[in-house]
Amino acid sequence: MNNADIQILLVEDNKSDAMLTIRALKKHNLANNLIHLADGAQALDFIFGTGEFVGRNIDQKPKVIFLDLKMPKVSGLEVLRIIKGDDRTKLIPVVMMTSSKEERDIIESHQLGVNSYVVKPVGFENFSKTIADLGFYWLVVNHTPHV
């Protein structure tokens, strides 16, 4: 896949949730240009072209980042803090996708500049519909500046 084709960067450590997310997006033809990474450290390396992604053209940014909150190595909040704190990446839309309904997580995510905070629904059908709706909104309906 050419970096220019990346539309969704999915950062999710739970393999089942990642698989369900990808399946829901594929079912609606929204996952053709998706990259899945399993932790926050990998996500930062990808976004900033470091570590295993050294040399990647960082001017090729995803259209949206679906980011889990609680992950190993680097948390979703820390990834969000770094993305939104850097002029090169702060305009990339970030959707926090989590099972946490904790008010402090919601508040901190918004204070850090999250574009949307979504609590993962329970049950396959609800989960699939929510993911498909998110993908459609961020890839088709929403307009973002070319960053």
Image (tube, rainbow, N blue to C red):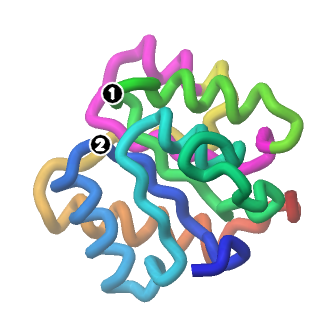
| Secondary structure under the numbered disc 2 in the rendered image | loop
**Depth check: 103 or 16 in front?**
16
Left or right of residue 84, residue 120 in this image: left
**Vertical placement of residue 60 versus 80, above or below:** below
Q: Is residue 114 magenta?
A: no
- Name the quadrant containing residue 29: bottom left
The residue type indicated by label 2 comes to Asp
- Residue at image position (43%, 48%) is 11
Residue 52: % across, % down: 54, 48
Residue 34: % across, % down: 49, 70
Left or right of residue 87, residue 128 in this image: left
Q: CA distance from mark 2 to mark 1?
A: 8 Å
Quadrant location, the C terminus:
bottom right
Left or right of residue 122, residue 79 in this image: right
The dot on residue 72 is 1
Marks 2/1 in contact by CB < 8 Å: the verdict is yes
The residue type indicated by label 1 comes to Pro
Q: Mark 1 packing: few (<14 Cα in 10 Å), some, or many (20+)? A: few
**Vertical placement of residue 64 versus 27, above or below:** above
Magenta stretch: give its range.
89-109
- Residue at image position (13%, 63%) is 124
- Name the quadrant containing residue 7: bottom right
Question: Which residue carries the number 2 mark?
Answer: 13
Q: How many marks?
A: 2
- Residue at image position (43%, 68%) is 133
**Vertical placement of residue 93 versus 131, above or below:** above
Q: Is residue 91 magenta?
A: yes
Q: Residue furthest top?
A: 104
Disc on the earlier residue, 2 or 1? 2
**Depth check: 29 or 45 in front?**
45
**Depth check: 74 or 115 in front?**
74
